[in-house]
Amino acid sequence: MTASKPILCLFITSLSCLIDLCWQQRQAGAPQIQLRLAGTRVPNEGRLEVLYNGQWGTACDDDFNIEVAHVACKQMGYELAMNWAHSAKYGQGAGPIWLDNIRCSGAESSLAECESNGWGVTDCKHSEDVGILCSTSRLRASEQPLTLTAQHTKKIEEIRIKPILARAKASMPITEGIIEVKHHGRWRQVCDQGWTLNNSRVVCGMLGFPGEVQPNIKFYRKLWNLKMKQPKSRVKMLSQKKMYWIHKVTCSGKEPHLAYCNVTVSPKTLKPVCKNGMHAVVKCLTATQSTKTNGKNSKKVPKMTEPVVRLRAGPHAGEGRVEVLRNGKWGTICDDKWNLISASVLCRELGYGSAKEAIFGAQLGQGLGPIHMNEVLCNGWEKSITNCKFKEASVAGCQHEEDAAVKCNIPQMGYKNQIRLTGGRSLEEGTVEVLVDVKGVKKWGAICGELWGMNEAMVVCRQLGLGFANHALQETWYWQGTPGALDVVMSGVHCIGTEMSILQCRHHSVVHCPRGGGRHSAGVTCTEHAPDIILNADLAQESAYLEDRPLSMLECAHEEECLSKSADDMSWPYGHRRLLRFTSRIHNIGRADFVPRNGRHTWVWHECHRHYHSIEVFTHYDLLTHNGTKVAEGHKASFCLEDTSCGKGIQKRYECANFGEQGITVGCWDTYRHDIDCQWVDITDVKPGDYIFQVIINPKYEVAESDFRNNMMRCRCKYDGHRVWLHNCHTSDAYSADLEENFENQQRLASNIV
């Protein structure tokens, strides 16, 4: 009798591998473990602790993800995981670290069924203890995973839409067609019996679409019936096999992934699968599509007006630090109770699909300015994150170290297939080659390196999914292009920097590249991490004042060209210059150090001031009329950058004294006080009136950043001939009103700076 059990199990496995008996036999020797959450006063949140072999221990955060958290939460009786935390956010545990490099599909009933390094096999410390936030709602007793059953063995690896209609096949992205689910390496169809728009909402969200609509089911049913009437139809033969189908899917509509839905891979009985049914069909809506549909119960995507949410500093499309607009100012969200459901509401609001990952701990960079919201809790159906329940962050005492971020599902547009890098030492660098249409024929070729800059390189790196641009190269002497693709097919490329494809940028309609391609082709190097510098607008506004400074005290400043041209014609050392002085503080809120392009070997000694200064221009000050005419120009500051101060726990790395290295560390800032020479705009020749005071940092984009849109600060400036007032100072993206106009003006100014 004992010998016959493996034979019976093998026989059943060969039929479907989904009968409970097999799984019970396979799991007979699985270790029995218990889980608990510790380190907080709430039952559904805390440090994950595991009871194994009679001793409580912890789990390491290496390779931990939301799928593992989902398994842990369900094992503890909660519906799903909302988020997880790394680096011992809920305090360091004690005892052994039982699990490391845990890998789950998200469908297991116990962490014991997931892959890992083995019990107690780890190189982690308790500073890497992982924490979990589970949903407050608990599973019903009948749903709690007591033993592994067929329904809990599903592994939804991937999902796609197979287009049937000719127009759907020709369109990009693909928005309509038959749903196919990859389960244990095999693509399956989904039976449409019991299929609802809530199911479609989850599928469309996974594929990067914010909305769904009822397709023309009658048309697809007609095609299905025609196939079923054909005796030798391949679809007819395959549809009679259990391995062809996902038997049933039931979603509430707010799930971020199909794996969170109730998915039955195959029926428990041997009756025919999907009897009288057909394959399920979905029709998704992009953010820009019309919401007019014929379906009575269709869901519509809300029409976007002025945006109240945005993502910043994300290395890829559809991800970044979350910022919301409240009371006219952009601010961040604190990560307390931040979860996938709330993140999905935000992603759909931005025109993407559901959230792929809810991120906290400022992993995508810290913001600067107000923190508007904390403990955001959405039910999944809100039109905007601002409609969800939340608490004021100021009450909770949140810091920017807790800024929330998100990774959204985005539609597959095929942009990666239009571009490639060749000849580089790694996949992140090389000569840029694009696929363009030349006289009706698709052809690979190079881009002219003339005028190629950082914005163009940013678009290329984003299009390839390689993050940010690190360098934009106008000459590629050491990188060999692809044979047959050496001809220049694009020239005069000019990008704003926000385009999703290099082909969306402005370029010559007829190629014009005097130096030719080859070694003069455009190239890039890409990186996942980049700095992001921003000027402290509040400090600049608070510190501004006028000074009438005698010429006898301005001789060194005059040598460094810190004064207006009219100073050349004065009777030195008699007279004075009227200076608008202020303090400049530059923060690095990115994820990499800001290091000038030229090293200290290029520094120039200034004898009068008795110091070195860089040949690079880091900041530029101007006083403008409201129509943009420049009335006074400040010094093109090229002082050494250093870490004047840093945030809590951050070590200074850059110091200019004693010919040290220059730069600004992540989380640090460089301060130039108002009383330093050349920290001013010379307004001696300016008439009384209302003006715009403007400061641009990294004006020529010579150093790569994750976001150039916050490099300009503007203030309203009122000058009555004796006193000056600065008010409404803000970076170019601090207010929504003139964002794109300011950004384009900033680019035009940068191209004119010499």
Image (cartoon, rainbow, N blue to C red):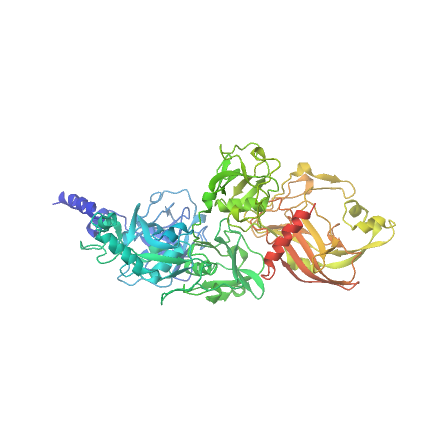
Q: Is residue 460 above or below residue 344?
A: above
Between 505 and 374, the one nearer to me in the picture: 505
In the picture, measured across the screen, residue 335 lies left or right of residue 742, that is left
Residue 149 in sight in this render: no
Between 174 and 568, the one nearer to me in the picture: 174
Between 489 and 279, the one nearer to me in the picture: 489
Residue 478 found in image quarter: top right
In the picture, measured across the screen, residue 275 lies left or right of residue 556, that is left
Quadrant including the N terminus: top left
Residue 59 in sight in this render: yes
Q: Position of residue 747 (x, y in %)?
A: 63, 50
In the picture, measured across the screen, residue 654 lies left or right of residue 249, that is right
Q: Position of residue 181 (x, y in %)?
A: 32, 51
Q: Is residue 335 above or below residue 659?
A: below
Q: Position of residue 464 (x, y in %)?
A: 48, 44
Q: Position of residue 170 (x, y in %)?
A: 40, 50
Quadrant including the C terminus: top right
In the picture, measured across the screen, residue 618 lies left or right of residue 186, that is right
View extreme (front): residue: 439
